[in-house]
Image (cartoon, rainbow, N blue to C red):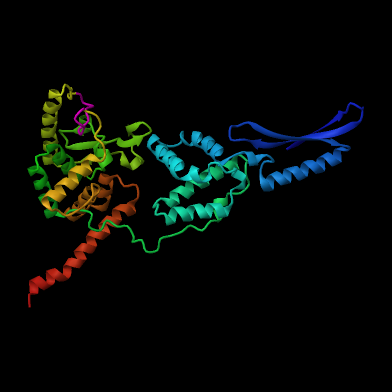
């Protein structure tokens, strides 16, 4: 919006001037452009209209001085207040490792679609599996700049996103143990004389908990009389290390039902943990005591269960699955045991019903494949 005013020069001539409010820079400061020396108000209005049209088409008149990095920092301050610490820490890492080295020092208004295309192509060709996340974050900064009226178009909108055609569709495949495989694994783990690891994987396989949820559990979360676990927090990585925060989704807050034997194993581990930590001078009798900790009674690093798992798999030559595979194991066995899809969904804390259905489809397909074998074995001629 332009404003106009008549003024007198030193020689006594009456001229016109105007000022146009262009918007605000990344720091929130108003950007106002002024022009003067017009003999009539009509001339000033024409000049102001041209200036405003130029701003609409090309952004601020002095936006060439504003770099991508400056706008990113302004956007990031606001972004931090909209997500959890673990989320903005990952986003910050992506910007500093991959995005700012490419765009940081460039004038924001001069970054072209071709430059954005080259960036995403380079990330893709260099094997970065999260190249889509990178370019989406770049787009976030441009969208913020548009809201601040620094630019009028987002150069990311017109890029062609590469796609790896040969990449197989991600499925649960064999990343789980069947009933006999699970029994064998737990027996091997028990024989390996690591009762903490045995308790951890028994709990995962018989509850469907995520690793991050299990690592955040305290004894106060377990109802030893009703054999239930209250899942209300998760372990994440913050800016200064591991943190405990609320689950990512509403559905992840849930009550999980566990069998009596697993609860008894947790009780046994609690007694053993108390003795081990007392020797080291730690009091673990408080209800908020973490169930799984390091030797100095701090949060267990998330890589530790993976180390336990791979050690046992290699030592006893077991089928290779991931730590998350024990969540698949629970889901598969739960469906095979007769639990309904809705019950499994609630136990696992799935937000999307289709996620549970994908597991159900895998289990039912396995059963279909066994029909011919069962018939052949029965007929046997």
Please tell me whether residue 220 belongs to the stretch shown in magenta.
no
Residue 324 placed where, x, y %?
25, 48
- At 90% from the left and 31% from the top, the residue drawn is 14
Q: Can you tell which quarter of the image residue 365 is in?
A: bottom left
- At 55% from the left and 41% from the top, the residue drawn is 105
Q: Can you tell which quarter of the image residue 20 is in?
A: top right
Quadrant location, the N terminus: top right
Residue 41 placed where, x, y %?
86, 37
Please tell me whether residue 293 belongs to the stretch shown in magenta.
yes
Residue 112 placed where, x, y %?
59, 51
Region of the chain picked out in magenta, as a range? 286-296
Number of disc labels: 0
232 lies above or below 322: above
**Residue nearest the viewer, comparing 226 with 288:** 288
Horizontally, residue 188 falls left or right of residue 174, namely left
- At 75% from the left and 37% from the top, the residue drawn is 2
């Amino acid at each position: 919006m332009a404003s106009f005013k008549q003024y007198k020069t030193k020689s006594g001539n009456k001229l016109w001037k105007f000022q146009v409010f262009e918007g605000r820079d990344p720091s929130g400061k108003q950007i106002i452009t002024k022009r003067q020396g017009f003999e009539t108000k009509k001339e000033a209005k024409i000049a102001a209209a041209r200036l405003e049209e130029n701003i609409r088409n090309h952004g601020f008149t002095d936006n060439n001085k504003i770099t991508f990095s400056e706008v990113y920092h302004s956007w990031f301050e606001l972004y931090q207040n909209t997500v959890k610490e673990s989320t903005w820490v990952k986003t910050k890492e992506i910007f500093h490792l991959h995005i700012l080295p490419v765009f940081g020092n460039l004038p924001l208004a001069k970054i072209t679609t071709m430059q954005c295309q080259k960036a995403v192509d380079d990330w893709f060709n260099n094997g970065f599996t999260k190249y889509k996340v990178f370019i989406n974050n770049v787009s976030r900064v441009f969208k913020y700049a548009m809201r601040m009226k620094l630019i009028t178009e987002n150069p990311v909108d017109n890029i062609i996103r590469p796609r790896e055609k040969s990449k197989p569709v991600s499925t649960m495949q064999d990343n789980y143990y069947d009933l006999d495989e699970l029994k064998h694994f737990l027996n091997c783990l028990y024989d390996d004389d690591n009762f903490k690891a045995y308790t951890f994987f028994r709990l995962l396989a018989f509850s469907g908990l995520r690793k991050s949820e299990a690592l955040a559990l305290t004894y106060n979360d377990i109802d030893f009389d009703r054999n239930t676990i209250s899942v209300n927090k998760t372990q994440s990585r913050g800016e200064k290390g591991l943190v405990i925060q609320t689950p990512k989704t509403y559905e992840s807050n849930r009550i999980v039902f566990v069998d009596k034997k697993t609860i008894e194993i947790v009780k046994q581990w609690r007694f053993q943990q108390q003795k081990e930590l007392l020797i080291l001078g730690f009091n673990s009798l408080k209800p908020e005591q973490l169930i799984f900790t390091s030797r100095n009674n701090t949060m267990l690093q998330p890589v530790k269960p993976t180390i336990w798992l791979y050690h046992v798999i290699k030592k006893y030559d077991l089928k290779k699955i991931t730590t998350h595979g024990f969540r698949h194991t629970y889901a598969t066995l739960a469906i095979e045991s007769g639990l309904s899809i809705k019950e499994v969904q609630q136990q696992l804390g799935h937000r999307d019903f289709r996620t549970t259905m994908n597991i159900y489809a895998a289990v039912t397909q396995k059963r279909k494949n066994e029909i011919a074998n069962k018939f052949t074995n029965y007929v046997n001629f």
